[in-house]
Image (cartoon, rainbow, N blue to C red):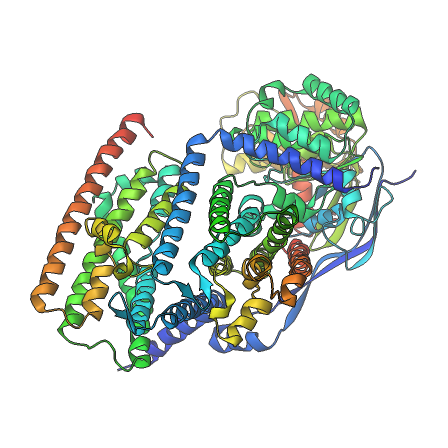
Amino acid sequence: MNNIIQLTDVSKEFKVLNRREGLKGSIQDLFSRDYKTVHAVNHISMNIHPGEIVGYLGPNGAGKSTTIKMMTGVLEPTSGEILVHGRTPYKNRTQNAQEIGVVFGQRSQLWWSLPLIESFKILKDIYQISDVDYQDMLALYESLVDVQDLYHKPVRQMSLGQRTLSDILAAFLHNPPVVFLDEPTIGLDVSMKSKIRELIKALNQQKKTTVILTTHDMGDVDALCKRIVIIDKGTMLYDNDIEHLRSFFGAYRTLKVKLSKHITDYSEEAKNRAIQTMEELITPQFPNAHFQISAEEDWVNILINESEVELMKVLSFIQTKNKIYDMQLDEISTESVIKKIYEGDGGHEPA
Amino acid sequence: MNLRKYFTLIKAGILDFLQFRLGTFVIIVGNMIYLIVIYNLWKAIYASVDTPTVNGMTFEETMIYLVLASSMFSFMECFLVWEMGRSIQDGNITLALLKPMGYAKYQYFSLAGNLVASFFLTFIPTFIVIEIITNGAIRPGINLLFFLFSVILGTTINFAVDFFVGTICIYTESIWGINIMKEVIVMFLSGATVPLAFFPKTLRSIVDFLPFQAIYHTPLTILTDSTLTIPAMLSMLGMQCIWVVVTLLIGNLFWHFSIRAITVNGG
Amino acid sequence: MKTLSLPYYAHIYKMILIQDIKSKMSYRADFFISTIGMIFTNLSSLAAFYITFLNFPSVMGWSYHEMLFLYGFSLLALTPLQCLFDNNWSLRNFVYRGDFIKYCFRPINTYFYFISEVFDLKGLGQGAFGLVTLIYAWNKLQLPVTFLIIVQLLLALTTASLFMIAIMNFAAATCFYIINSGYVMVTANKFRDYAKYPITIFEPFFRFIFTFIIPIAFIAYYPSLLFLRTNNIPLLTWLSPLIGVVFFYLSYLFWMHGARNYTGTGS
């Protein structure tokens, strides 16, 4: 399969002046320039296929924005090669800009005092969009969101959500093969977030646009991305399917069962008794599996590694021995997995 | 006595300067260029007439007047119009109204510290440099005391004018336009750009009936005109006092009238 | 894809300009007050000029009306800067807030895109003021009016305008390199006031400075010699269009280099 974006061993270094402390230091700074090299991005390689939505994740200062700036042609990589749609972005910034769309955080790129439709008209001419394509795009927009209400509103009078929506529409307007979205849902309320996610998804499907999305909101990732790339301190930690991410940690799920109708005794001893009973019940039956059992209020929780034993088997076995009044299943969330990766205990299969 | 803390203070001051060295450097260079231009211009003007005095002022007197006027202008510049305009626009003015002190009073006294500091930092050094260069053209004496009073009164009139103009920002969003109008009118009619002695008679008599000449012209005349008698200086101070009362009164009346409009409309 | 040619840029410029003017018109009060402010600025500056030179038949061989010619010429030459390049004043804020990056994502030249965003209408008032002054002086000096001279005048004005635009480009772009660059802009802006004086009033050293380092002498003095001293036109006058283009280009390179430099920092 051919790639629309190709990063090969890309690094970016910045030189930062080491400022010395105190009076003597600042006088020395006047005469000497003692630079420290910061490795913002370190030997990153990735290939992105046309039409993908890729979540690009990492804690603050991980190098996400630097990578995006390199892919948009604003920054030149120190080493390595970047190809976007077959071009080196930095060498052809203006041509590259023609074929990408960018939404950068909360910074609106629209004309502050102009109504949205006027901004669109200017963009139409800047990107030299033909009348037919322009009308098609507007028709598509109208079918997806209530854009009519926004057309005649100056951007500065819009709410943050409306502004983000407008910025995303503007980024897709010239139907670029690639769109970069840097934290598009930051600061928005729940309903606006889901509206924006639906819009991105619809545009991706209708126009086959490749979308690179950075975010701190795992809701965005779960709703939109099949594939995620995680970097921290400039180094790539993970690049694969989001499904695979969960199994990366072992396929853990928590089974919660309620074994008596009314529990009156909430003491520690009672909890310990419940845990012990459960352990004595299931451990002999599944000797190869490692369970972590805990108790809280009415529930007994069993953490099960499904690569060792299927959860359903455990559940049906318990049912043959006890009456189960109620049960729940807890998936391990993407958020907690990624948190674990950031914290550096990724990749280990817990024993 | 521990001298260490004084050294620490001085060090912090120098550090601060170096941190912002470029800004300071640029300001000094900018002022120097301004002085060079003014100096050359008036030298050329005086060279083109035969008499040593024009409108009763020698070249040296004109230069002293203009240099001191420009330095007074920069020390009195307090950006009050901008500050009022901004806080009216972003609504912070309501916070200021909650303070247990009249808004004008609050602004006046928070600016006062600033003005004292910049008086010592910009005006005094300029004055000393001029005294050295001109070999003491300004006779220090009782006039210094009168000058000091006159500067305080002048600053107050300047404040009152700024406060009045700042209040206009309640009615318009155009802070830039309002401020630039104020600036040029005050600069010109107070005699900071061209000494009032050069003004044609009719214009001069109009200017004398306006408060602006009491901002720079009166203190500067008290400082530089060695022929002034004490009663003459006293009567000049008296005129300034009247202007202080009048401008503050008008400013406050206008403010209270306008602020009622805000509170009624829920600005 | 079509090449990004001159007609393309002209078309985009027109689009953005018309939209900007339209949206400015929705703040009519602001526009009127700013324009009145601009007129006041020019009026007071002209009055100061009038008062200063009225009493003198000539300064260093320059008659009053010749000085007025320089004055009007400089105002006209500064009009394009005021009208078309005003966004340079906001550059600092965009850079410090991190919003500048939005100008780097479009398939057009960053400097062009940034500058195109603002058209300052009140600059037209200044232009009208300059034009009237120039015509008045032209008339009083009984200078000839021929087709060739009009063409020369237009060319001289256009190239003269490049100098101050370039100075402001340099000043604005300092914000890419240093903190606290506001003073640089304010100081550089004052240079425009000095452009209206004949450079001969300065000592040779400053003549050199104002010709080659801070080339404000090209804004009015050198081009005006083309009309006022027809029998003795120096080489620099003939070269001034070339120097203007080169100087502007250098300032553009400095600006763009800064823009590229800036986007390299920060995450």
Using the rendered image of the protein, determine whether residue A254 is visible from the camera's viewpoint.
no
Q: Residue C180: x and y, percent? A: 50, 60
**Of the pair A117 and B184, the residue shown nearer to us:** B184
The vertical placement of A251 against B33, above or below, is above
**Of the pair C169 and C222, the residue shown nearer to us:** C222
**Of the pair B199 and B236, the residue shown nearer to us:** B199
Q: Residue at x 43, y 40 (%)?
A: C34
- A100 sits left or right of A182 in the view: right
Q: Residue at x 50, y 46 (%)?
A: C135
Q: Residue at x 70, y 43 (%)?
A: C105
- C147 sits left or right of A285 in the view: left
The vertical placement of C17 against A139, above or below, is below
Q: Residue A248: x and y, percent? A: 77, 42
Q: Residue A167: x and y, percent? A: 64, 33
Which quadrant is home to the C terminus of chain B? top left
**Of the pair B7 and C148, the residue shown nearer to us:** C148
Instruction: Report the number of discs.
Output: 0
Q: Residue A60: x and y, percent? A: 62, 49
